[in-house]
Image: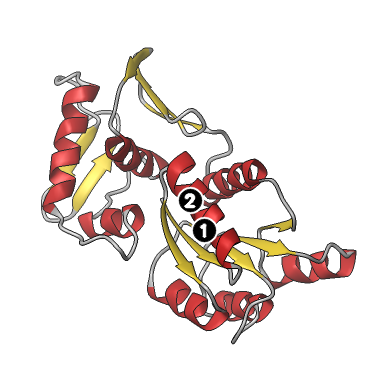
Amino acid sequence: MRILVVEDERRLAQNISRALREDCSYAVDVASNGADGLFLAGSSEYDLIVLDLMLPKIDGATLLRRHRQSGKRTPVLVLTARDEKESVVALLNAGADDYLTKPFDLGELLARVKALIRRGKGHATPVLKVGDLEVNTIEKSVRRGGARVELSPMEYRVLEYLAHRPRAVVSKSELLEHLYDFNWEKFSNVLEVYVSGLRKKLGHEAHPLIHTVRGQGYVLRDGV
């Protein structure tokens, strides 16, 4: 998953991005002002945006409004120092999906981020199921046929993204877009290595779960 954090308080932005990377294994891009945040939000596909309201150049509420007017439906978690009822109602009406009032606990932020991503992908529970495969997005664990499958962090990230989009063909470019931030040099052949490792570890050669659609990408589904 790839997250955009728009926050001008440097220490807070660092703490949030570190927690998202280390605790959730998400790719994270950071913008320190509203103008850069609006540009990034419009030029890349993100699974969630963490947005501060008090920003230089373009304030968070304006960024949110313009982002929604462009047709983007990316889930947005707003960080605000204002907890008045009128401000919260205005944020939600402008297109925010959830909000946190500063100061907040990082654990609560991570929990809300995960919930919003699940909701955005159309999943109500943290356990994603495809056939006899279970991906627990809270525990970051995988089971097939009840047996635990040990994966590397990147193998898990690839599988989790595919599990969020079961039976849909996901292109290599889409996977790269959602797995890596701007600081990583993207090479599509790296994905082939991870997918190959996943297939071996998931086993069941007679009933594979990850299928290659020639010229299009990969699809996670139960059955041929």
Quadrant in which the C terminus is drawn: top left
| Local SS, label 1 | helix
How many C-alpha atoms fall within 10 Å of the one at disc 2: few (<14), some, or many (≥20)?
some
Please identify the residue farthest to the right as the structure is shown.
85
- Figure check: 67 above or below 21: below
Q: Which residue is mark 1?
A: 14
The type of colouring in the image is: secondary structure
Q: Quadrant of residue 52?
A: bottom right
Please identify the residue farthest to the bottom as the structure is shown.
57
Query: CB atoms at circles 1 and 2 under 8 Å apart?
Result: yes
- Figure check: 117 above or below 84: above
Task: Describe residue 131's horizontal placement relative to residue 169 as left or right.
Answer: right
Q: Position of residue 93 (x, y in %)?
A: 74, 69
Q: Position of residue 151 (x, y in %)?
A: 29, 28
CA gap, disc 1 and disc 2: 6 Å
Residue 199 in sight from this viewpoint: yes
Q: Position of residue 69 (x, y in %)?
A: 57, 80
Q: Nearer the viewer, residue 209 or 8?
A: 8
Task: Describe residue 14's horizontal placement relative to residue 215 as left or right.
Answer: right
Q: Position of residue 1 (x, y in %)?
A: 41, 50
